[in-house]
């Protein structure tokens, strides 16, 4: 039926006097006369001729796509090669993690890797902000029993220029180094650093508290020495002196006579050891033995444990020193840990959810609730107060092993998330989450921190020494001295650009490029195939063969008795118009022929 429809559709009717008669004639001719005359056989012969013609050219699939009439077409060959190349590249890149390989190659620490230059001398603006609690009622506190009234003074801002020195790579996938830090005061961001502040006399109160375990006679001797030396429970110092050191006879005496392992510095300063090249030698994992330990400490001063405590988990050093963290996309862990010598321990951070930083996806971490929990409620904290040692209430951490055995305790600023009793004994403290909470924002694919805020408070634990006259009225309490904030608000533009390209940009560009190559290559090849197929089927020879057949049968229609007997009812003028295609041999074809 398709052949019969195609035959009749080639007839153009110029004048028809009866439309119903036309329908009857078409049915009659197609269904009765023409079918019986064997017209379908002639069309089948046309199909066989075309098949024989294509077979006679003996084309194989590839030459068929790149040639025309047996001649190689250079432009078509180039297009086919480009399509095959794009398709192959797309399939290959979609089946292998090529982008992850490139990222890891530059992320792992090695001498000359991209991450090495950012790690060795980051160039980020790292600020240390110091806030000191000024005691406004020292006399009434000592003599009238008032609660100490504290006034927070600050910030005193110091820019920390840091680089890693004495770097040595090891064959086991680790690297050793030391930190070199230089703190420079930033006056435009700070309050007056020369202002005198009233703070507890830490060396004197430490000595008085320790005297309680030395016996009555020794206490009296200490009391006499302190009285003769005119020592007072409070001293007036500037912020710079409290942070980086001031002369104190008791500290000088301890420096000269204490054992070497516990010998304090020659001056009294809470951050006196932060300037210069630090003594600690860190050894961290470079990532070449697995990204699960990337950036984590392997050894500290040559040993694989913290020397300040006796039992695990307090002795664990499985933590980052702040440069890199194991990517969460690899570890799937909700806990990361940070080590800082001033903390005297590793500080865990718990995953809180995804967020963003300057258009880059990051994970937010804050300390878990158990971090400074009491030993009676949290078994992991028992090793921080072994035996009969004093175990502080919630919110405090003993760091005396890192402070030359001075009774210094760590907490979050303003006793944030600490036991309520600590706040009741002091006026002037107001814990605020936004100002006093610690957090870290880490890119989960790379393990690179984009923002860190480490905020801790230093407190002096005082035990009342009634037999030491100068401090006999100083009650037992946890006295806040200062708190500091250190970290980074943002990385350098170079680091941010590198992280952005390796994460946000690549997450979009990689699938677009990969699957775009597949689609582009497929479309090119399909287009070439369709174009080639058309050129093979609708050539000049094909149309000539088909039109000769239609010409012979058109003559039959014009001489049929049905039309000659009723010329007044229907007038048919048969005309077949067609355009011949150029066969590529340079000859100019007939623009139009009629049969």
Image: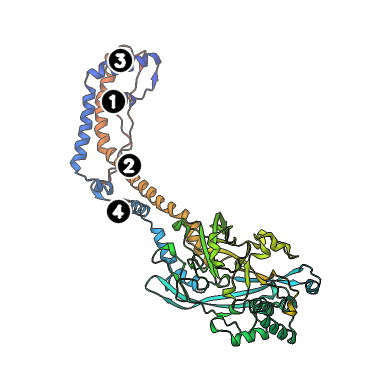
The outermost residue toward the front is: 216
Cα–Cα gap, marks 2 and 3: 38 Å
Q: Earlier in the sequence, mark 3 or mark 1?
A: 1
Q: Is residue 48 above or below residue 146?
A: above
The answer to whether residue 243 of the structure is visible from this angle is: yes
Cα–Cα gap, marks 2 and 4: 18 Å
- Give the label, 2 or 4, closer to the camera: 2
Image spot of residue 110 (x, y percent): 42, 71
Q: Earlier in the sequence, mark 3 or mark 4?
A: 3
Give SS at disc 2: helix
Q: Earlier in the sequence, mark 2 or mark 4?
A: 4
Q: Residues within 10 Å of mark 1 (few under 14, many from 20)?
A: few
* Point 71% across, 86% down: residue: 225
Give SS at disc 4: helix
Q: Residues within 10 Å of mark 3 (few under 14, many from 20)?
A: few
Give SS at disc 3: helix
From the image, which quarter does the C terminus lie in? top left
Cα–Cα gap, marks 3 and 4: 53 Å
Name the one closer to the observer, 339 or 595. 339
Q: Is residue 591 above or below residue 182?
A: above
Q: Read off the residue under disc 2.
A: 530
- Give the label, 2 or 3, closer to the camera: 2
Q: Residues within 10 Å of mark 2 (few under 14, many from 20)?
A: few
* Point 64% across, 74% down: residue: 158
């Amino acid at each position: 039926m398709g052949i019969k429809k195609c035959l009749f559709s080639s007839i153009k009717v110029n004048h028809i006097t009866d439309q119903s008669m036309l329908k009857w004639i078409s049915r009659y001719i197609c269904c009765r006369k023409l079918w019986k005359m064997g017209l379908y056989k002639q069309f089948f012969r046309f199909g066989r001729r075309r098949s024989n013609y294509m077979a006679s050219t003996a084309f194989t699939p590839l030459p068929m796509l790149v040639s025309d009439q047996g001649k190689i077409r250079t432009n078509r060959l180039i297009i086919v090669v480009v399509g095959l190349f794009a398709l192959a590249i797309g399939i290959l890149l979609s089946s292998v993690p090529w982008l992850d390989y490139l990222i890891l190659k530059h992320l792992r620490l090695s001498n000359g890797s991209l991450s090495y230059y950012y790690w060795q001398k980051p160039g980020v603006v790292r600020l240390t902000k110091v806030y000191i609690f000024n005691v406004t009622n020292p006399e009434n506190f000592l003599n009238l029993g008032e609660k100490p009234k504290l006034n927070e003074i600050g910030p005193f801002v110091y820019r920390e220029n840091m680089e890693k020195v004495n770097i040595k790579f090891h064959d086991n996938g680790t690297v050793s180094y030391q930190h070199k830090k230089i703190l420079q005061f930033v006056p435009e961001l700070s309050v007056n650093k020369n202002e005198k502040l009233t703070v507890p006399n830490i060396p004197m109160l430490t000595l008085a508290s320790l005297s309680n375990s030395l016996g009555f006679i020794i206490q009296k001797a200490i009391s006499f020495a302190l009285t003769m030396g005119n020592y007072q429970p409070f001293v007036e110092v500037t912020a710079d002196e409290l942070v980086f050191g001031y002369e104190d006879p008791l500290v000088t005496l301890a420096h000269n006579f204490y054992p070497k392992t516990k010998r304090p510095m020659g001056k009294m300063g809470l951050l006196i050891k932060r300037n210069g090249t630090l003594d600690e030698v860190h050894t961290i994992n470079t990532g070449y033995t697995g990204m699960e330990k990337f950036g984590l400490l392997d050894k500290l001063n040559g040993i694989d444990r913290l020397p300040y405590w006796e039992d695990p988990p307090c002795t664990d050093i499985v933590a980052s020193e702040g440069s890199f963290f194991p990517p969460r996309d690899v570890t799937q862990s909700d806990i990361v840990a940070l080590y800082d010598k001033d903390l005297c321990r590793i500080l865990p951070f718990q995953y809180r959810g995804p967020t963003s930083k300057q258009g880059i996806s990051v994970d937010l971490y804050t300390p878990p609730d158990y971090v400074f929990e009491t030993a009676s409620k949290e078994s992991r904290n028992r090793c921080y107060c072994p035996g009969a040692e004093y175990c502080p209430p919630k919110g405090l951490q003993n760091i005396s092993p890192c402070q030359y055995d001075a009774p210094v305790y760590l907490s979050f600023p303003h006793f944030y998330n600490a036991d309520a009793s600590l706040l009741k004994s002091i006026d002037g403290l107001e814990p605020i989450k936004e100002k006093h909470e610690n957090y870290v924002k880490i890119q989960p694919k790379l393990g690179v921190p984009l923002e860190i805020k480490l905020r801790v408070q230093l407190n002096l634990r005082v035990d009342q020494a009634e037999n030491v006259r100068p401090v006999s009225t100083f009650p037992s309490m946890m006295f806040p001295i200062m708190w500091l904030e250190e970290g980074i608000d943002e990385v350098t533009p170079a680091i941010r650009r590198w992280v952005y390209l390796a994460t946000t940009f690549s997450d979009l560009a990689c699938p677009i490029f990969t699957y775009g190559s597949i689609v582009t290559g497929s479309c090119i090849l399909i287009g070439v195939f369709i174009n080639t197929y058309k050129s093979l089927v609708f050539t000049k020879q094909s149309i000539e063969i088909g039109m000769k057949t239609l010409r012979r049968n058109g003559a039959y229609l014009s001489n049929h008795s049905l039309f000659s007997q009723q010329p007044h009812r229907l007038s048919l003028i048969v005309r077949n118009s067609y355009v011949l295609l150029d066969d590529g041999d340079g000859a100019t074809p007939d623009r139009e022929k009629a049969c």
